[in-house]
Image: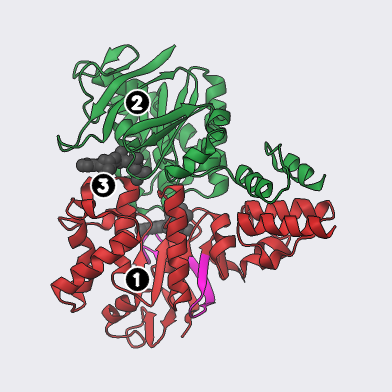
Amino acid sequence: MPINFKDVSFTYSYKTPFENVALNDINATILDKSFTCIVGKTGCGKSTLIQQLNGLLLPTKGEVIVDEFVVSSNRKRRTKKLANLRKKVGIVFQFSENQLFEETVLDDVAFGPTNFKVSKEEARKIAKECLLKVGIKEEYFEKSPFELSGGEKRRVAIAGILALSPSIMVLDEPTAGLDPEGTKEMMELLKKMNESGTTVIVVTHDMNLVLTYATNVIVMSDSRIVKEATPDELFLDNDEKYSLETPYIAKVVQELDKKGIKLDTKVIKDVKSLASEIARKRKNK
Amino acid sequence: MNVIEANNLKFSYDGKNDAIKGVSFSICSGKYYSIIGHNGSGKSTLAKLLIGLLKPSKDSLKAFGLEYNSKNIKEIRRKVGIVFQNPDNQFIGSTVKDDIAFGLENRCVPQKDMDKIIEEYSKKVDMFDYLDKQPEKLSGGQKQRVAIAGVLAMHPEVIIFDEATAMLDPKGKREISELIKKMRIDNPNLTLISITHDVEEAFNSDEIIVMNEGEIYMSGSPKEILSKSDELEKIHLGVPFLYSLANELNKLGIKVDDYSSLESLVNSICQ
Ligand SMILES: Nc1ncnc2c1ncn2[C@@H]1O[C@H](COP(=O)(O)OP(=O)(O)OP(=O)(O)O)[C@@H](O)[C@H]1O
Ligand SMILES: Nc1ncnc2c1ncn2[C@@H]1O[C@H](COP(=O)(O)OP(=O)(O)OP(=O)(O)O)[C@@H](O)[C@H]1O
Ligand SMILES: [Mg+2]
Ligand SMILES: [Mg+2]
């Protein structure tokens, strides 16, 4: 089942003098099993949008539909037990490092599964697997999460959500603070999860990642959605840029195009495939 | 002139393992440094040592010729400012305005100049319209802008950015780097130490310090570091896009020598 935003508006501090409109009449669909990236400039509403997905913030107007769940501020419409929605939708927040709270790294990640009626032992087993997946080594398991570096904290926070095995995984700037190898590994991990059926939703400012990994892109501007497209449509086929940064790969494609070398953009996803496509073109010439 | 000198600088959080394992380096006035390194390599620890938030081993660190002791620490912090990795750790005031003002008060800036400075710096980072907002009610990128304004307003001689622009959009990142560039032209003694995972950004600095497991693995100009690019991968790091494309092309038998800009790379492909 896809996720549907129907006429969603959200205003912070609604009906107070400090009212601040952060979402304005959002209508959008996030496809089931897609790898959707949400992009747009600072303050345009990305983090606010994703927090509607598990009812952490309730739309001031309109509703969000996720499978059988209805997220709405209208009590009559709203699904009674939104807690069950949180099992389905896992969100890693933008400053996820602020969310760690248990005494040890392992306990922190195991906390989620134990909460969802998994035995303590089983939860620790899951936690270990998830920590290793995000590159946290065994020697860190008994450390306090407060005694980690920034990137290590972020990895632990992501492991905490992985451990819940949500069917929809939402991550707000998951690679901010990760080292280059960590970024690549994290994105590959998400790609693998996506291929095995998890819907992945990522907020990011890194258009290079968007081009390589996303199947769908939602572009936001000034509290609204201004474009829904595939990354190829957005960066390779189109001239309208919605004031987004052009990914490096797209820049090369465009420059070569100007010189009369037309690459087959369908096969280009990363540096390697770009290089081999250039090589193929040169051979054919 | 060297503004900071470290000599066999060590630090341990737990008294057993060293997070910083005896590093030596000097920071020269007016230069722009980048520090890169894998997660947990000791970058933030080093930064916290440089502002005296963590205690360096004895006789191992000096800033502006001053030892890091309780007598000098105030003076050192006046000269060395930091934007922390997590902006939530930076905020003290209940509004953006109070927050910037707090640092200025600490520096005994007269009340009458305060409003002008706050206006000036909040405008520089495009947050003037948010002065009355609570910092915790800002978006991620807005928080980082405010944290940057707060530090710049205090006119430190050495600015340390600990991933200070990691949450900014690409345009915002460029704006901040332009802003710093301008400030460095106005004040040629302004030193910038930028801790970053953004390879492209790092390779724009004068000198790159590469950290690995608590040690300085290597340091040098971007050119020097690139000439040892194989090593970077070994320690979980990456190289700039144009370089990696040139590299891949060379592997496929397409010779690309000039990857200094997109144009030159494209030109050599077309040859
Ligand atoms: N808790 C809050 N209370 C009031 N206003 C808020 C709150 N959080 C965010 N805002 C405001 O709502 C708008 C949208 O913020 P949001 O955090 O969704 O932006 P974003 O697109 O995630 O930006 P960034 O890329 O900087 O993280 C911004 O103008 C912001 O100042
Ligand atoms: N408060 C602390 N107590 C104990 N150990 C710590 C503490 N803070 C960091 N460490 C450890 O010290 C080492 C260096 O951490 P530091 O924060 O300096 O890394 P970093 O290079 O800044 O990494 P990142 O890129 O993830 O921010 C890491 O192994 C980390 O786990
Ligand atoms: Mg955000
Ligand atoms: Mg750090």
**Chain containing mark 1:** A
Residue B153 percent location from the top left of the image? 42, 29
Q: Which residue is mark 2?
A: B111
Identify the secondary structure beneath mark 3: loop
The front one of A190 and A246 is: A190
The correct choice, above or below, for B204 with respect to A192 in the image is above
**Chain containing mark 2:** B
The quadrant of the rendered image in which ligand 2 is seen is top left
Q: Quadrant of residue B212?
A: top left
Quadrant for the N terminus of chain B in the image: top left
Q: Which chain is green?
A: B
Residue B37 percent location from the top left of the image? 41, 39
Identify the secondary structure beneath mark 1: strand
The front one of B17 and B1 is: B17
Q: Which residue is mark 3?
A: A148
Question: Can residue B9 be seen at all in this image of the molecule?
Answer: yes
Magenta range: A11-37
Crowding near the residue tagged with mark 2, few <14, some 14–19, many ≥20 C-alpha atoms within 10 Å: few
Q: Nearer the viewer, mark 3 or mark 1?
A: 3
The correct choice, above or below, for B46 with respect to A206 in the image is above
- What residue is shown at x 39% (from left), y 43% (from top)? B38
The answer to whether the beta carbon of the residue marked 3 is less than 8 Å from any atom of ligand 2 is yes
Q: Which residue is mark 1?
A: A90
